[in-house]
């Protein structure tokens, strides 16, 4: 091959590469499986399934005035039920295994972009009160989706995983007439529930040892920093938004783990500190369902010690709409005393009797 022919061949290769990359980028931009660039198109079907890729796009591009957020215990909420009860237009942004900081940061982005977001239903995991404020289970994030820097969008436009797991499934759904994932279906699960299922994942004899059961200055500071740095940071920054915050009704087996390990009193004191801090915020409505014993003590509603089925998510929405479980400055100490009495004296051994 002589030099002029080699030059022509090289130019054609470069042009072919540029055309191919441009085509791929255009396909990704048009389909935009994680809503990074635009709202969903009516002529495309969308599969919503990867929370840490999808949620920020929902915040950016969807039209809504209410949001449900929290860890995996919020995945079975149905926004349509919330809409019917609160006359809202709701989206769901759950983060499986999320810590407080992750949820707070996501809410901050959502609220800064959407001035119409006036109601947030926020599940505050009870077992996270005595973790470091920045505790995180997941550290590998698609950061290029979370910022407004176009210079790092190459990681989105030319990402094999996004093309194969995001773009192509949406195209396939569109061509086969498969409807988009609804917000009710998004991230929801239908795992088996019941006593045998719970006991398959919970064994009190294998509980990790606890270094200390005391509640001292270190624990006080930990709870205060966790609540202040995450929840109060967002609540106070957006005073025109109402935050419906609730402690999820973990099962009696969770309370068994606290009682068996000797950390029940420590957890109750952490709850008292968190509750006092949250009740100082005028735009917070705090709910506690630990007295819903017909739910908490019935393993048929649970898939493990903490996760409940969608029926309980529906009940939680109804309870909040009716102000059942509302915590106030006038009743929180009484409610805490009732918790201490019930969960300190419960016959936990009866859970294992057949």
Image (cartoon, grey):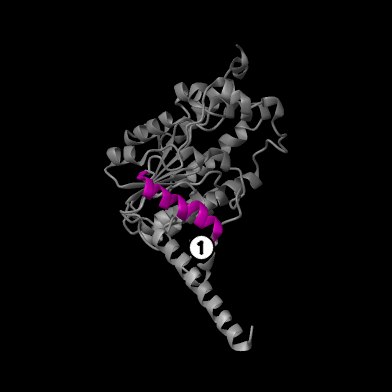
* Viewer-side residue, 17 vs 10: 10
Using the rendered view, name the quadrant where residue 245 is placed: top left
Q: Main secondary structure of the magenta part?
A: helix
Magenta span contains residue 162: yes
Outermost residue toward the bottom in this view: 4
Residue at point 63%, 86% (across, down) = 2
Is 107 on the left-hand or right-hand side of 268?
Answer: left
Residue at point 68%, 35% (across, down) = 213
| Disc 1 target residue | 156
* Viewer-side residue, 290 vs 27: 27
**Looking at the figure, which quarter contains the C terminus?**
top right
Say which element carries label 1. helix
Q: Position of residue 34 (x, y in %)?
A: 44, 56
**Looking at the figure, which quarter contains the N terminus?**
bottom right
Residue at point 58%, 80% (across, down) = 10
Outermost residue toward the front in this view: 1
Q: Position of residue 192 (x, y in %)?
A: 51, 27
Magenta span contains residue 90: no
Q: Position of residue 115 (x, y in %)?
A: 33, 59
Is 129 on the left-hand or right-hand side of 67?
Answer: right
Q: Position of residue 22 (x, y in %)?
A: 46, 70
Outermost residue toward the top in this view: 354
From the viewer's perspective, is residue 200 above or below residue 122? above
- Residue range highlighted in magenta: 158-179
Residue at point 57%, 29% (across, down) = 305
Using the rendered view, name the quadrant where residue 323 is placed: top left
């Amino acid at each position: 091959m002589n030099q002029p022919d080699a030059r022509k061949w090289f130019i054609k290769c470069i042009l072919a590469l540029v055309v191919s990359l441009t085509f791929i980028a255009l396909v990704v931009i048009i389909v935009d499986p994680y809503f990074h660039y635009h709202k969903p198109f009516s002529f495309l079907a969308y599969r919503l399934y990867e929370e840490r890729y999808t949620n920020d796009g929902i915040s950016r591009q969807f039209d809504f005035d209410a949001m449900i957020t929290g860890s995996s215990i919020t995945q079975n909420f149905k926004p349509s039920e919330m809409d019917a009860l609160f006359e809202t237009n709701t989206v769901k942004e759950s983060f499986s295994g999320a810590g407080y900081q992750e949820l707070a940061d996501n809410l901050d982005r959502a609220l800064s972009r959407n001035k119409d977001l006036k109601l947030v239903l926020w599940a505050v995991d009870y077992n996270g009160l005595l973790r470091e404020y920045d505790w995180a289970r997941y550290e590998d994030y698609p950061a290029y989706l979370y910022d407004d820097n176009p210079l790092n969008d190459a990681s989105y436009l030319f990402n094999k995983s996004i093309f194969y797991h995001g773009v192509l499934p949406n195209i396939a759904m569109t061509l086969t007439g498969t409807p988009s994932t609804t917000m009710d279906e998004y991230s929801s699960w239908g795992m088996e529930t019941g006593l045998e299922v719970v006991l398959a994942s919970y064994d009190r004899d294998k509980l990790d040892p606890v270094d200390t059961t005391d509640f001292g200055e270190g624990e006080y500071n930990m709870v205060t920093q966790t609540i202040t740095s995450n929840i109060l940071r967002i609540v106070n920054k957006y005073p025109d938004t109402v935050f419906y915050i609730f402690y999820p009704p973990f099962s009696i087996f969770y309370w068994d783990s606290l009682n068996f390990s000797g950390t029940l009193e420590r957890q109750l004191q952490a709850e008292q500190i968190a509750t006092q801090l949250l009740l100082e915020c005028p735009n917070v409505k705090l709910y506690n369902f630990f007295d819903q014993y017909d739910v908490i003590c019935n393993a048929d509603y649970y898939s493990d010690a903490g996760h409940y089925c969608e029926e309980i998510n529906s009940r939680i929405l109804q309870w909040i709409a009716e102000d059942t479980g509302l915590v106030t400055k006038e009743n929180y100490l009484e409610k805490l005393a009732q918790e201490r009495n019930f969960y300190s004296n419960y016959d936990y051994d009866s859970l294992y009797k057949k």
